[in-house]
Amino acid sequence: MLVYMIRRFGQSLFAIAAMALLVFVGVYAIGNPVDILISPEATELDREAQIIRLGLDKPLWEQFLLYVVNVARGDLGNSFVYGTPALTLILQRLPATLELALVALAISVFLGVPLGVIAGLRPDTAAGRSIMAGSILGFSLPNFWQGMMLILIFAVILGWLPAGGRGTTADVLGLQLSIFTRDGLAHLILPAINLALFKLSLVIRLARAATREVALQDYVKFARAKGLSERRIVLVHILKTIMIPITTVLGLELASMIAFGIVTETVFSWPGMGKLLIDSIELLDRPVIVAYLMLTVFMIVMINLVVDVLYAVLDPRINLKDVTT
Amino acid sequence: MSDTALDSVNLDEPARGARPGGSLKRILARLFEDRLALIGFALVAITAVAAIAAPLIAPQNPYDLAGLDIMDGGLAPGSQSMAGKTYWLGTDEQGRDMLSAIVYGLRVSLYVAGSATLIALAVGMAMGISAAYFGRFADTAIMRIADLQLGFPPILIALILLAVLGRGIDKVILALVLTQWAYYARVVRGSALVENQKDYVAAARCLALSDIRIMARHLLPNCLPPLIVVATVQIAHAISLEATLSFLGVGVPITEPSLGLLIANGYDYLLSGRYWVAVFPGVALLLIIVGVNLVGDRLRDILNPRLQK
């Protein structure tokens, strides 16, 4: 177990290092770092000072060392637009993004697992078929368009919910969260549904496939033969088994939710990291783009690591000695 | 080719005969047994034909600025133009007929997604087969890169790449290829590893056929069926991803609007109630993706040996 964890940790470090190297090559070796790291609106004097401060007059290998040290210290440059450190700027937006991703994840699990189990137990009934048809639709709807349709229906036509923004936030443990105020919750509903729909379809399919497989296993048949109630069979014997694959996939999907948050945040003007990224791309605020990339890569690698280790702990069938991924 | 007659007759035959899932004809026949898959196939066929024949069937050339009448701007679906024409799906701000814009947009969307999928398929197949065939270092190197990449959400990879490279149809295709090749490589490697152990490959090796010939003529045909399923699903992903990138403003240029860019354009008018500019291109997008997914779902059932009775 320990050997596996160390190896897995080493791979994560390698992934981060590879990404850092790619970014360095992209910024310093291919492009002109002066154009990328120094605002085009800076004066000539300012420019000279910046070049010296960033060490761009030094040889490439020295620049690389400096870059590594800076990245390790969390110094990823200042935003051209706001003039503040890019990393701080992104970290300020992090709670909004995480709140949205976690609420969406909760929706997809608490709605998706029951629906998937129903579809798996009764695949040939009208209910089972319509759940599956719904999940194909959920897979097919392009995320951003579906969000716009939610706005059109619930904000423009019906006028029930606000079309964008975060609403009033409450201070919880030093974090600004929307979910604890009435107004914030109203702002949260549409983006959360928008982000959840794709994962919801995924969870439904996973749960359905797993249930179909598990329902034929001997221990389930035995539980039936023993005369246990259907409720107990489903809630204890089936649910417990199918949660293993679902948990792992969802762990990995959390990473993609943070990435897909970019789309949802743009559609709903949700002030998270993703919206910041798109705004920065439009404004050519490159330090923020680079910082976003580094931070997201770090987060995703960490999530993947935790999920893999959890999976190994949860499922004793995994062979820890010979894992290649 | 200097191969003997014996070689070309006997050696490639067992490989073809052993192809799982049966011939293409049989697969198609089984595909059409399912009503949903038939609907899906029809949707895909209709949109593909509409995209190819766009200049013939579109009522207007949406790129020809001289043909646009600003007086017809922002008309609701079904209203009459100044010249007495009917705009079935309404017009945008510049008086562009939405139906024509959608048909032309389909062209861009399908061209980008289709060519990206084909290129990614070729790259992924080459990588996956080489990894399985040569093993050792090639295998480790190729699959490590693929795994590393699959750990990241495709949209993130594409977005960052385009943020650096800028807009452009070729750049979007490049980004889509980069996000997709690893899926194909992994699937091909999986089936090629199994095939590589079989006698016909050993026989081919004994005859000292070239590596390339063994890979292309013997291994590849036997690795195709699972790949077809992945490719169908990936086309849907590619169409959706391209639309998303264009919506976010890093995709195709404004001069060649895809469906995603048309929708982005409609976003600004959504709150003022001119819904049609955003809704109809989205419906077109949805129809293609649903169609492709329906076909893909059915193909998966047909080609999955575990579900075969």
Image (cartoon, rainbow, N blue to C red):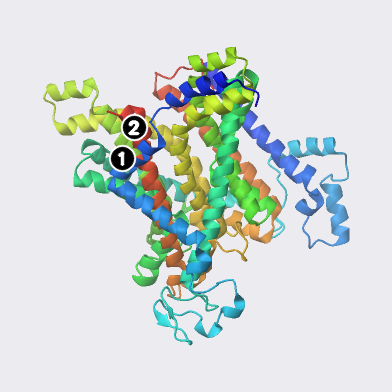
Please tell me how crowded label 1 is: few (under 14), some (14-19), or many (20+) other residues with Cα within 10 Å.
many
Q: Position of residue A93 (x, y in %)?
A: 56, 52
Residues at badges 2 and 1 in contact (C-beta under 8 Å)?
yes
Query: Does B157 appear above or below B51?
Result: above
Say which of A232 and A115 sits in front.
Answer: A115
- Reading the image, the residue beneath label 2 is A243
Chain ID at mark 1: A
Query: Does A22 appear above or below B287?
Result: above
- Give me the residue at 45% from left, 23% from top: A312
Q: Position of residue B151 (x, y in %)?
A: 54, 35
Chain ID at mark 2: A
Q: Secondary structure at mark 1?
A: helix
Q: Earlier in the sequence, mark 2 or mark 1?
A: 1
What kind of residue is marked 1? Val
Please tell me how crowded label 2 is: few (under 14), some (14-19), or many (20+) other residues with Cα within 10 Å.
some
Q: Is residue A322 left or right of residue B32?
A: right
What kind of residue is marked 2? Met
* Discs 2 and 1 share one subunit: yes
Query: Does A93 appear above or below B223?
Result: below
**Which labelled disc corresponds to residue A113?**
1
